[in-house]
Image (spheres, grey):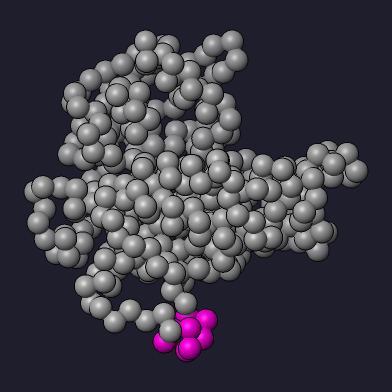
């Protein structure tokens, strides 16, 4: 239970039933973590800079914010009986970002880009686990890319939500599509969450690399060339998009369509891809072009932002070991979490 509480605190994911002992404190290596239960939120306080290490894993810790997240799903709170009034009066809204779960081409180590590939069994499990992590965070609208792996992730995640609302893809591509997908029951509408699919949130288009094995491509063109195509900000692969080009469309769509929803008081989830989400995070966190190329996002891990007074406040995963702005669950952090589970189970 303590390990679960710590994980939820690191991710700032509000989950009921955890962190039962308010103010409990644990030590890990040469730093301590204080968990403070606040309603359905968890406030994590890293009390000392330091590091945890073993023979094959290491995580440097940077002091986290001591402010707690107050956004919670009204249905989860016994003190809040009027959901609609609560949303209207709320000065904070939630923004959840989720990279899709593992796809069949992730598993095969192929460049995927805009090829429409579904999830693996592991990807399905990752999406469901992501849903459990965000089950108490309110969601009023969902945006996904036009690709099935992102849409599957969003749909599967919402099966775990406490509100039990049904995510429904909005078909606005034609008047006939709108008419044929119309819902005529107001009660059913209230129990539904609109899902808007937008190609602007698609993965970066990898051009002539799509479908190629990443290792074989590195052997053919050289590791340095492939690394430049994959990790530079403004150099595209042959007939493909650079990260800069991907950011232009993804951020423009976010500012024109999603940010106004947050301003109106709605809680939003985005299920998309590594590069389209990196682009949006670059905008939210005001990262430079050099910082964003070091940002890594693991599949199926939700990241939470709070939108308050026109500003985005990150309540995501902890800062990574070296690069500024890296806070997703990287491989080293995943190993750390595994070791932490083992420590806390004894």
Task: Answer with left or right where residue 69 lies relative to residue 337.
Answer: left
Q: Does the magenta stretch include residue 228?
A: no
**In the image, residue 64 above or below residue 291:** above
Q: Pinpoint residue 106: horizontal percent, then vertical percent.
A: 66, 45
Q: Pinpoint residue 17: horizontal percent, then vertical percent.
A: 22, 34
Q: From the image, which quarter does the C terminus lie in?
A: top left
Looking at the image, which residue sits at the far front? 121
Give the quarter of the image for residue 31. Answer: top left
Q: From the image, which quarter does the N terminus lie in?
A: top left
**In the image, residue 186 above or below residue 336:** below
Task: Answer with left or right where residue 338 lies relative to residue 26.
Answer: right
Q: Pinpoint residue 5: horizontal percent, then vertical percent.
A: 31, 28
User: Residue drawn 15% across and 47% down?
Assistant: 77
163 or 260, nearer to the observer: 163
User: Residue drawn 26% across and 50% down?
Assistant: 162
Q: Is the magenta stretch mostly helix, strand or loop?
A: helix
Residue 68 in view here: no
Task: Answer with left or right where residue 22 lies relative to residue 224.
Answer: left
Give the quarter of the image for residue 116. Answer: bottom right
Q: Pinpoint residue 309: horizontal percent, then vertical percent.
A: 29, 58
Looking at the image, which residue sits at the far right? 220
User: Residue drawn 42% across and 20% down?
Assistant: 341
Looking at the image, which residue sits at the far bottom? 175
Residue 128 in view here: yes
Specify the segment rendered in magenta.
172-179
* Count of numbered circles on the image: 0
Task: Answer with left or right where residue 162 lies relative to residue 209.
Answer: left
80 or 189, nearer to the observer: 189
């Amino acid at each position: 239970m303590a390990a679960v509480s710590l994980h939820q605190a690191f991710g700032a994911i509000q989950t009921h039933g955890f962190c039962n002992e308010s103010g409990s404190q644990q030590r890990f290596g040469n730093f301590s973590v204080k968990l403070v239960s606040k309603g359905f939120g968890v406030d994590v306080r890293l009390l000392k800079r330091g590091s945890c290490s073993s023979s094959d894993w290491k995580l440097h810790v940077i002091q986290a914010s001591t402010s707690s997240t107050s956004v919670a799903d009204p249905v989860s709170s016994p003190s809040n009986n009027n959901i609609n009034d609560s949303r209207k009066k709320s000065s904070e809204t939630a923004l959840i970002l989720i990279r899709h779960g593992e796809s069949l081409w992730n598993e095969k180590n192929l460049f995927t880009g805009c090829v429409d590939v579904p999830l693996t069994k592991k990807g399905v499990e990752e999406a469901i686990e992501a849903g459990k992590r965000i089950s108490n965070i309110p969601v009023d609208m969902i945006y996904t890319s036009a690709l099935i792996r992102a849409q599957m992730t969003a749909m599967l995640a919402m099966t775990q939500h406490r509100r039990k609302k049904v995510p429904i893809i909005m078909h606005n591509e034609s008047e006939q599509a709108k008419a044929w997908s119309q819902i005529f029951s107001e009660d059913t509408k209230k129990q539904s969450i609109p899902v808007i699919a937008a190609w602007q949130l698609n993965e970066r288009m990898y051009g002539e690399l799509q479908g190629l094995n990443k290792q074989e491509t590195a052997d053919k063109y050289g590791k340095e060339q492939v690394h430049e195509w994959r990790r530079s900000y403004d150099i595209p692969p042959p007939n493909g998009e650079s990260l800069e080009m991907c950011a232009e469309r993804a951020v423009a769509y976010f500012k024109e369509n999603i940010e106004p929803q947050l301003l109106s008081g709605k809680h939003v989830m985005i299920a998309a891809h590594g590069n389209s989400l990196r682009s949006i995070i670059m905008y939210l966190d005001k990262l430079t072009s050099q910082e964003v190329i070091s940002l890594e996002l693991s599949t199926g891990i939700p990241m939470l932002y709070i939108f308050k007074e026109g500003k985005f406040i990150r309540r995501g995963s902890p800062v990574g070991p070296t690069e500024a702005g890296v806070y997703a669950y990287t491989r080293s952090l995943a190993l750390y979490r595994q070791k932490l589970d083992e420590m806390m189970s004894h």
